[in-house]
Structure formats: C-alpha cells, structure tokens
Image (tube, rainbow, N blue to C red):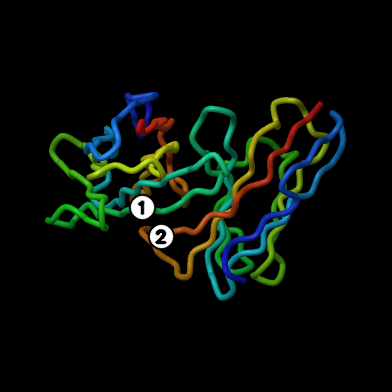
Amino acid sequence: GAGVSQSPRYKVAKRGQDVALRCDPISGHVSLFWYQQALGQGPEFLTYFQNEAQLDKSGLPSDRFFAERPEGSVSTLKIQRTQQEDSAVYLCASSYQVGEFTEAFFGQGTRLTVV
Amino acid sequence: AQKITQTQPGMFVQEKEAVTLDCTYDTSDQSYGLFWYKQPSSGEMIFLIYQGSYDEQNATEGRYSLNFQKARKSANLVISASQLGDSAMYFCAMREGPSGGGADGLTFGKGTHLIIQP
C-alpha cells in the first residue's frame, strides 16, 4: 500500500472487553513498531518487530498487552480486559531496513476509548 | 530523568516568520539519532528531519533545519518562512545505538504545539 494503514480508526470498548488493533505496514518494510500516545503526550514505545520476530517488548505496560506479526507483514496489538488507563491513540510505524537511524513511517493511529 | 525535553508547550508565530522549537536530550551513548516529527490534528506522524550524532553538519530539509549543538545536547528545529499549514504538534525524538541499552523504538518528547497566525 501507499502508507501504513491502521484499523479501526476509532474503537470504543467497555471496561473488561478484549480489543484487537490491526496494522498494515508499507509493503516490504522489515521493521514494525507500536507506540501508545496518551492525550497531550508524546508517543511511548511499546514493542518492535523485525520481520516476524518480536525483538523488543520492553514497553508493553502489562501482560494484558500482546502483539504479534506472524508472517512478517500485518501486525495485531491485542489488549485483554481493557481498563480506562488503556485509553489512548495506538500508533504503528514501519521502516524499510534494520538500523537504529532509519526513518519510520507512521499510520494515522487507532483511538481507543475505554468506558 | 527525561531523555527528551521540549520546554515550549505552545508557541504562537506570525506567518512568514522563522520559528525555533527547542529540544534537549540526555544520553550517555556516543551513537544516537535525533528526529523531528510533525503531527497535525489528523493524527499521523510526519517525519521532518534527522540528525546523526556523528554528523558534523547540521541537517537541512527544505524549510526545516536542525541546529545541532552536541556539547549542549541540544537539537533545535528551525522552520524558516513559516506557513499556516505548519500549525501542528511537533515532537523531538531520539533513538540510541545498540550500546545505549534503551528500547529499540524512538523516545519522544512531550511536544510543542505550534500555531501560525496570519
């Protein structure tokens, strides 16, 4: 695709509900990142994939958060038993090569509201 | 301690003026990269400019330049001839090298909300 695509754009979940957020990176991009952006804050790193391998999940806030990228392209971020503090915009980014200083292209994000 | 500090929560600038957005960073790593992103109200993060820690010259991309002062750990973004469409949130971010021990992703500041006035 032309850019990083995320779906849904908006999600309202009742507290305790499980949600799944999808990220479709730019075709051929090796690296994929998930970030969480609370209202009025900068994005915070959650997890990183290189192809299908999850190389860094140090930013996941709890074991309720789980991410996967089974075939090295599309990724899903799953949040179990959602809580109000999970309300945020979840951003996905991809980059075409491995390297610390490679430009990452971001999607428009999924705004999650937990009520 | 904050790794990226942006001290200007909001700025109002007259159209066509130049504007400087401040960013200081904290790392003990010798190898790192500094990025600036723009986030309009639509939500996507748009890459603007990158500076590597070993780059001797300041990065420039069109109307954007990065004033890199390594000894002061400062990486200010300069936008020349501002336009109404420059109104957005601006984030400074850093990625440390493998020896930095940090996460593989970018560390972002809290952002500066820039409003360009006609």
On the image, the x and y values in percent for residue A11 come to 78, 41
Left or right: residue B94 compared with residue B28: right
Can you identify the residue that label 1 sits on?
Answer: B48
On the image, the x and y values in percent for residue B80 come to 22, 45
Can you identify the residue that label 2 sits on?
Answer: A103
Q: Quadrant of the N terminus of chain B?
A: top left
Q: Chain of mark 1?
A: B
* Foreground pick, B97 / B85: B85
* Foreground pick, A5 / A38: A5
Left or right: residue A112 compared with residue A48: right
Q: Quadrant of the C terminus of chain B?
A: top left
**Could you give the CA–CA distance between mark 2 and mark 1, rounded to whole angstroms?**
9 Å
Left or right: residue B7 compared with residue A107: left
On the image, the x and y values in percent for residue A54 come to 61, 59
Could you classify mark 1 by the number of other residues whose Cα lies within 10 Å: few (under 14), some (14-19), or many (20 or more)? many
Q: Residue at x 75, y 39 (%)?
A: A64
Vertical order, A66 against B91 (above or below)? below
2 vs 1, front mark: 1
Vertical order, B31 against A51 (above or below)? above
Q: Are marks 2 and 1 in one subunit?
A: no
The three-letter amino acid code for the residue at tag 2 is Glu
Q: Chain of mark 2?
A: A
The three-letter amino acid code for the residue at tag 1 is Leu
Q: Residue at x 60, y 50 (%)?
A: A108
